[in-house]
């Protein structure tokens, strides 16, 4: 009898925490619409609005060639790439192949049906200078893929920074966000990408 009560209690606590987080996200979205959201990282926190499959934002953003994109892999880790345009983006696949894929293929085999864009506080995609030609030049190249040391986040950062040096390498999603915030001198907001506009 006590075990079901523990489960119910855990479910209630989880629901309360989720509702609280949802309210905070909605408040942050209202602040963005009013122009009151933080422009710069707050208390060394680069990512102000993380991508979320459970808490939808108030606005979807159309991608621009060179946009930094991400989706979830099994709801646990993030996978990143660079938007090329015309329903096409560049990613580092787990096989080590840098490839150009469609939105459908980018999401295939991964959980969720949403792609997110790295944006500023005004819902504008962050685009690094020369990132597009670097990403395009990398297509069909092979990299020695490693989940922790040479992954999609490192590939994206190398396209942005034009550097493969070890001390500048990025290993994880949070580290990528920190580097993006420093590079753009902006707080990072991950907004839902407007996929419907691509299909019109």
Image (spheres, rainbow, N blue to C red):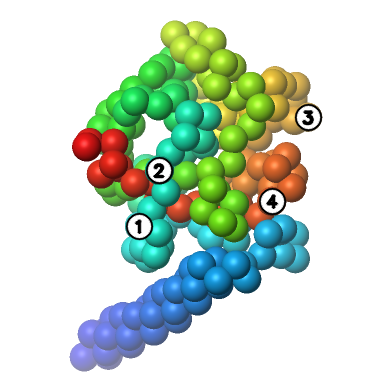
Q: Which residue is mark 2?
A: 62
**Looking at the picture, does residue 24 appear above or below residue 61?**
below
Which corner quadrant of the image does residue 168 belong to?
top right
Mark closest to the chain's N terminus, 2 or 3: 2
Mark closest to the chain's N terminus, 1 or 2: 1
Residue at horizontal 72 percent and vertical 58 percent from the top? 40
Quarter holding the C terminus?
top left
Q: Secondary structure at mark 3?
A: helix
Q: CA distance from mark 4 to mark 3?
A: 22 Å
Q: CA distance from mark 4 to mark 1?
A: 23 Å
Looking at the rendered image, the disc whose residue lies closer to the viewer, 2 or 4, is 2
Q: CA distance from mark 2 to mark 3?
A: 33 Å
**Looking at the picture, does residue 104 appear above or below residue 111?**
above
Q: Which residue is mark 1?
A: 53
What x and y, as percent, mark residue 8?
A: 27, 85
In-image side of 142 versus 158 (left or right): left
Looking at the rendered image, the disc whose residue lies closer to the viewer, 1 or 3, is 1
In-image side of 172 versus 136 (left or right): right
Q: Are marks 4 and 1 in contact (CB under 8 Å)?
A: no
Quarter holding the N terminus?
bottom left
Mark closest to the chain's N terminus, 1 or 3: 1
What x and y, as percent, mark residue 182?
A: 74, 44
Which corner quadrant of the image does residue 70 belong to?
top left
Q: Are marks 2 and 3 in contact (CB under 8 Å)?
A: no
Q: Are marks 4 and 3 in contact (CB under 8 Å)?
A: no
Q: Which residue is mark 4?
A: 186
> Which of the two residues, 112 or 64, is positioned nearer the viewer here?
64
Mark closest to the chain's N terminus, 2 or 4: 2
Looking at the rendered image, the disc whose residue lies closer to the viewer, 4 or 1, is 4
Q: Secondary structure at mark 2?
A: loop
């Amino acid at each position: 009898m006590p075990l079901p009560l523990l489960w119910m209690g855990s479910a209630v606590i989880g629901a309360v925490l989720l509702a609280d987080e949802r309210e905070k996200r909605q408040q942050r979205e209202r602040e963005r619409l009013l122009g009151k959201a933080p422009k710069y990282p707050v208390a060394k926190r680069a990512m102000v609005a993380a991508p979320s499959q459970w808490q939808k934002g108030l606005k979807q953003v159309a991608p621009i060639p060179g946009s930094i994109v991400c989706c979830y892999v099994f709801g646990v880790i993030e996978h990143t790439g660079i938007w090329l345009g015309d329903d096409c983006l560049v990613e580092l696949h787990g096989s080590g192949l840098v490839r150009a894929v469609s939105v459908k293929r980018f999401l295939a085999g991964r959980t969720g049906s949403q792609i997110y864009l790295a944006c500023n506080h005004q819902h504008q995609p962050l685009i690094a200078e020369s990132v597009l030609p670097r990403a395009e030049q990398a297509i069909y190249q092979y990299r020695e893929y490693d989940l922790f040391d040479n992954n999609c986040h490192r590939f994206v950062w190398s396209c942005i920074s034009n550097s493969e040096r070890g001390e500048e390498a990025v290993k994880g999603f949070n580290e990528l966000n920190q580097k993006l915030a420093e590079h753009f001198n902006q707080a990072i907001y991950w907004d839902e990408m407007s996929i419907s506009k691509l299909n019109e």
